[in-house]
Amino acid sequence: MKELKFAPVQGSEYAAQHDALFYLITALTVFFTLLVGVMILYLLIKYRASNKNVDRSNRIHHHLGLELTWTIIPTILGLGVFFWGMLLYKDSRTSDDNASDIYVVGKQWMWHFQHPNGLRENNELHIPLGRPVKITMISQDVIHALYIPQFRVQFHTIPGRYTTVNFTPNAVGKFNLFCTMHCGAQHSEMGGYVYVMQPDEYDKWLANGGNRFTKKADTMVESGRKLFVENGCVNCHQEKDTYRAPSLKGLIGKIRRMNDGRVLVGNESYIRESILMPYNNVLEGYENVMPVYPFTEEEVTQLVEYIKSLSGVSSEQRDARAASAVGPAKRRDDVAKQNNDANITKQVEATSAEEIHSEVTSEL
Ligand code: HEC
Ligand SMILES: [Cu+2]
């Protein structure tokens, strides 16, 4: 009986709560189904036409107390379930400030992951135990849904829009990864595994380029910067606003006024749309002259990270700040590690917004 599993192991911090809510809803459903069913059966048999021994006078047509009871109690129970569910949903949609960012692109029929340091994985995701993870995802073709049953994590990946989900893995091991939105002929093969590792093992893994890379991959900011230069964005977008184009510095969180009077906020989705469909949102004071580029979603995520780095808020910069904010003992370890792997620290240093931007403009 112990082997008969009702639910997969609880691999994330909030899995237990999701399960508790699920069991509560199941219990309420079973209880009320039985209650109503048993009463129907009882009354059916008791008042059957052939039973002459029951009192059929004084029929009750209205009973206020009874009606209030069966309205108020289920309402309270229903709202309780709703609020509990709402809090859990909010939890999974709100990210921790020091969460590790993972970018996901779903496409027919595979999952493509990228870590901020540039490491890529296909149909496999490695994450550290006990550290919050923020997943930002998008689809390159049709709607998919990322599902990690052991974490009780499931969310849609939608073409044209970033969605996010947050969780903290709390068990080491190998977990399933599925697509749960029927997305075409090979939908059932669109899956893989999530590996939760001990944090120190994970850091080593990450620093050594993961499973298949010997050379350290470009960080997302670096890849984005390359795209920015190679595609000539830098010809129009410079350090300061010019008559040709606005500067992209500090764009994150800034209020943007459009030519047609709309007011938008400079966030990831806005940047993405500005790159893929520049004609949709033409900034006040500028012409619709920005060319349309046929970037893949993966390239766009890298450009987004690069443009974020110009405001000093790329995932990489946040990671670096979080790392330097830990206590002195930890920092000494870090320094030792950095000496071993001077490579990484250099890259983190070299990605301060100022440096890159001046580098980019000097490459003109
Ligand atoms: C020919 C000049 C030109 C080139 C090349 C160009 N842009 Fe633009 N871009 C503009 C102009 C003009 C605007 C403002 C009007 C608009 O929103 O379309 C703009 C707006 C933007 C915005 C929104 C800025 C804001 O402040 O709201 C982003 C983001 C952006 N471009 C990114 C890029 C990227 C990335 C590239 C390269 C792949 C690129 N642009 C190439 C001219 C250009
Ligand atoms: Cu799919």
Image (cartoon, grey):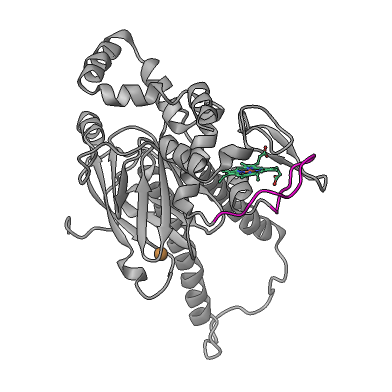
Choose between 276 and 364: the one closer to the eye.
364
Residue 88 visible:
no
Choose between 355 and 272: the one closer to the eye.
355
Q: In this view, does 35 lie above or below 94?
A: below
How many numbered marks are there?
0
Question: What is the x, y in percent for residue 348?
Answer: 38, 25
Quarter where residue 307 is shown: top right
Instruction: Look at the image and give the residue range highlighted in magenta.
Output: 279-293
Q: Is the magenta stretch mostly helix, strand or loop?
A: loop
Which quarter of the frame holds ligand 2? bottom left
Residue drawn at x 36%, y 48% is 113
- In the rendered image, residue 21 lying in the magenta stretch gets the answer no
Choose between 85 and 11: the one closer to the eye.
11
Residue 110 visible:
yes
Quarter where residue 177 is shown: bottom left
Q: Is residue 41 above or below residue 112?
A: below
Choose between 27 and 234: the one closer to the eye.
234
Question: What is the x, y in percent for residue 43?
Answer: 53, 76
Question: What is the x, y in percent for residue 169?
Answer: 32, 39
Where, quadrant-wise, is the N terminus in this rendering? bottom left
Quarter where residue 146 is shown: bottom left
